[in-house]
Image: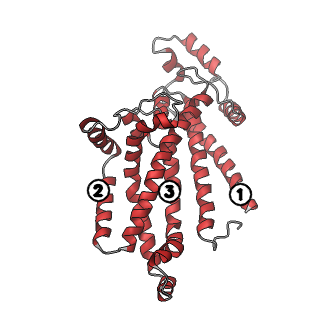
Amino acid sequence: MFAYLLRRLGFLLLTVVLTSLLVFLIAQVLPGDVCRVILGREAGAARLAECRADLGLDEPAAVRYLTWLADFLRGDWGESYATGEPIREWVLGRVRMSIMLAGVAFVVAVPLAVGLGALAGLLHGKWPDTLISIGSLAVVGLPEFVTAIVLIQFAAFRFPWLPASSAIPVGTPFREALPALILPALTATLVLLAYIARLTRAGVVEELRQNYVRTAELKSLPRWAVLLRHVLPNALLPTITVIAISTGWLVSGLVVIENVFNYPGLGRLLVFAIDRRDLPTLQAIVMVTVVAFALANLAADLLYAALNPRIRVGE
């Protein structure tokens, strides 16, 4: 297990380095001039040249990449081109806000989706299966902003239970932020529900057809025991991958949801950085996103081994 963890952490570091190179190269070919965005269209050639020299943009690309990567790994993420703020504190503050939102959505979405999927699989071909399948597909077919607007209309305007806007200050404690997190989290839950539920259902249906299930039933084991001890651990293996990917998406990919609700998360900061062509901030956000996905996949691999002892994580 220890050797496996070391190998995976090595892969994680390699992924981060390769991604950093790719992100840097993409940032260099983006259209537009950073200094033109900062100084405005009326800036003269002398001021533009001075700006490029101050930002180090007049140095060779290889030098700029190595300098940026070394500083990033040391924890010096530079300053924002748009605001002049230290990027590390700025981005990590938004990461905290995104983790709070992702945590609420995860706690609601995963147990609900797995439970509905297991129920649909257990009652395969019956009316609860049909109802769950049609209902989840109907919800996931709606764009995120439509789902968000419907929830705002009913839960904030028609029945004023929750705030319509989630524009809270960065650093707000979780308990105070919770009311503003519920509607965005419900929107993300409805997006994830069908994918996880249907994959769980398919896994349960497949496992229920296996010989070991019939053997367990012939031994008069309770139905719930067969489902919990034998069927679900095997049926959830493909679902874990989707959940891992969804975790990375919840942390950094809620761009539409965060903008609809004005929530100060990482996705909204990403839009800001793109609009202002704030390349250092954009690069930092992408790097944090890659690490989030890599850690989620590592957790998924470890969970594979916990659910299925036949998987030898040491190989």
Inspect the image, locate mark 1, and give the three-letter code of the amino acid beneath it: Leu
- Give the mark, 3 or 1, whose residue is nearer the N terminus: 1
Q: Which residue is labeled 2 in the image?
A: 138
Q: Is residue 234 visible?
A: yes
Residue 61, numbered circle: none
Above or below for 275 versus 198: above
| Residue 24 in which image quadrant | top right
Q: Which mark is drawn over residue 5?
A: 1
- Quadrant in which the C terminus is drawn: bottom right
What residue is at 30 percent from the left and 74 percent from the top? 126
> Residue 45 vs residue 128: left or right?
right
**Which residue is nearer to you in this view: 215 or 304?**
215
Q: Residue furthest bottom?
A: 218
What whole-number distance in Å separates the C-alpha atoms at marks 3 and 2? Answer: 20 Å
Callout 3 crowding tier (Cα within 10 Å): few <14, some 14–19, many ≥20: many
Q: Is residue 190 above or below residue 196?
A: above
Indicate the secondary structure of the residue bearing disc 1: helix
Q: Is residue 279 placed above or below 146 in the rendered structure?
A: above
Q: Residue at x 53, y 42 (%)?
A: 99
- Left or right of 131, for residue 179: right
**SS for callout 3:** helix
| Residue found at the far left of this picture | 158
**Residue where numbered disc 3 is placed:** 243
Tag 2: residue type?
A: Ala
Residue count near mark 2 (Cα–Cα under 10 Å), binned few <14, some 14–19, many ≥20: few
Quote the CA–CA distance across marks 2 and 1: 41 Å
User: Could you tell me residue 89's position as x and y percent?
Assistant: 61, 29
Residue 215 on image: x %, y %: 50, 87
Q: Residue type at mark 3?
A: Ile
